[in-house]
Image: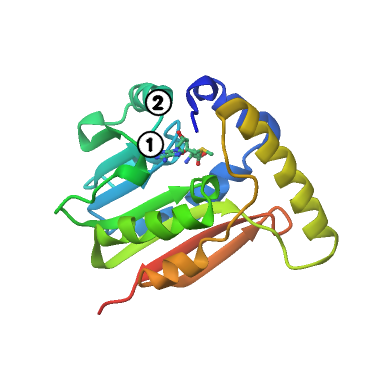
Amino acid sequence: MNFDRLAAHYHWLETICAGGLMQRCRTTFLPRTQNSRRALLVGEGTGRFLVELLRCNPEIQITCVEHCEGMIKQARERLTSEGQDGSRVQFKHMDALDWMPPSEKYDLVVTNFFLDCFRPEQLQKLVPRLAESTTTEAIWLLADFRVPERGWKRWRANMILAMLYAFFKLAASLSVSRLTPPDTYLVNAGFNLMDRRFASLGFAHSDFWKRTAT
Ligand SMILES: C[S@@+](CC[C@H](N)C(=O)[O-])C[C@H]1O[C@@H](n2cnc3c(N)ncnc32)[C@H](O)[C@@H]1O
C-alpha cells in the first residue's frame, strides 16, 4: 500500500467525489475531545481533521502515525496555511502495523477512513496494538464507510465501495478489496460504542467509542 502518488490529489478528489461528506463525518464528535490532552491520530492523511482538533483544543499534544511521506508533507503545509502551532504535533513516518506503542498513554485515538484499508487478520493485530497505548478511559473516534443491512441502500453502498476499492488498488496498490467492520475488534480491545451517527443513506458513519475502565 502506498498513498504517495495520491497525496497531492487527495483533497480535490475528495471534494469532487464526496463534497463535504467525509469532513462532516470526521468532525461529528470533535466537540467531545475538549478534555483530551494527548491524542494519537493514525493514517491522518492530509491533516483536515488534525487542524480542526488543534483549533478546538488549545491544550492538546498530538502524535500522527502516517505511512505516506507525501501525506505528512500535505498535513504540515496545511498546519502552516491554517496558522496552527505545529510544535504540538509529532509526525511519525511509519507503518502503523509495525508501530510499538510508547510508554506514554493517549486519551484520544482517531482513525478516520483508515481501518477500511486493512484485512481482518491485520485489524486483529492493529486494533489491540493501538488500544494498548491508551489510558483507561480513553476515547476513540472514527469515521468510515459501511454497508447498510438491506435493500437498495445496500446495493448502492456495495457498488460505490467496489469502485472505491478498484480505484485505490490502482492508485495506491491497496491489497484489500472489501470492507471489514471494525466493531468486533474494538469491543475485544475493551472499547464500548457510545454513539454512532449515519450519513449518506447509511453509507458512512461516525463513531464515538470509549474504553471501559477495568
Ligand atoms: C484512505 S486514507 C484516509 C486519510 C484520512 N484519515 C481521511 O480521513 O481521509 C488512508 C490513510 O492511511 C494511511 N495509511 C495506510 N496504511 C497505513 C499504515 N499501515 N500505517 C500508517 N498509515 C497508513 C495512508 O497513507 C493514508 O493517509
Residue at (57% x, 39% y) in the render? 175
Q: Is residue 102 left or right of residue 199?
A: left
Q: Residues within 10 Å of mark 2 (few under 14, many from 20)?
A: some
Residue 122: % across, % down: 45, 52
Disc 2 marks a residue whose amino acid type is: Arg
- Mark 2 sits near ligand 1, with its Cβ under 8 Å away: no
2 and 1 marks in contact (CB < 8 Å): yes
Q: Residues within 10 Å of mark 1 (few under 14, many from 20)?
A: many
Q: Secondary structure at mark 1?
A: helix
**Above or below: residue 151 compared with residue 60:** below
Residue 184: % across, % down: 49, 69
**Above or below: residue 152 compared with residue 20:** below
- Mark 1 sits near ligand 1, with its Cβ under 8 Å away: no
As measured in the structure, the alpha-carbon distance from the residue carrying label 2 to the one carrying label 1 is 8 Å
Q: How many marks?
A: 2
Q: Secondary structure at mark 2?
A: helix
Residue at (15% x, 53% y) in the render? 104
Disc 1 marks a residue whose amino acid type is: Val
Residue 136 figure quarter: bottom left
**Above or below: residue 193 compared with residue 98:** below
- The quadrant of the image that shows the C terminus is bottom left
Instruction: Say which residue label 2 marks.
Output: 78
Is any part of residue 68 visible from this angle? yes
Residue at (67% x, 32% y) in the render? 167
Residue 42 figure quarter: top left
Most distant residue in the bottom direction: 214
Q: Nearer the viewer, residue 94 or 61?
A: 94
Q: Is residue 28 left or right of residue 75?
A: right
Instruction: Say which residue label 1 marks.
Output: 51
Q: Nearer the viewer, residue 194 or 113?
A: 113
Q: First in sequence: mark 2 or mark 1?
A: 1
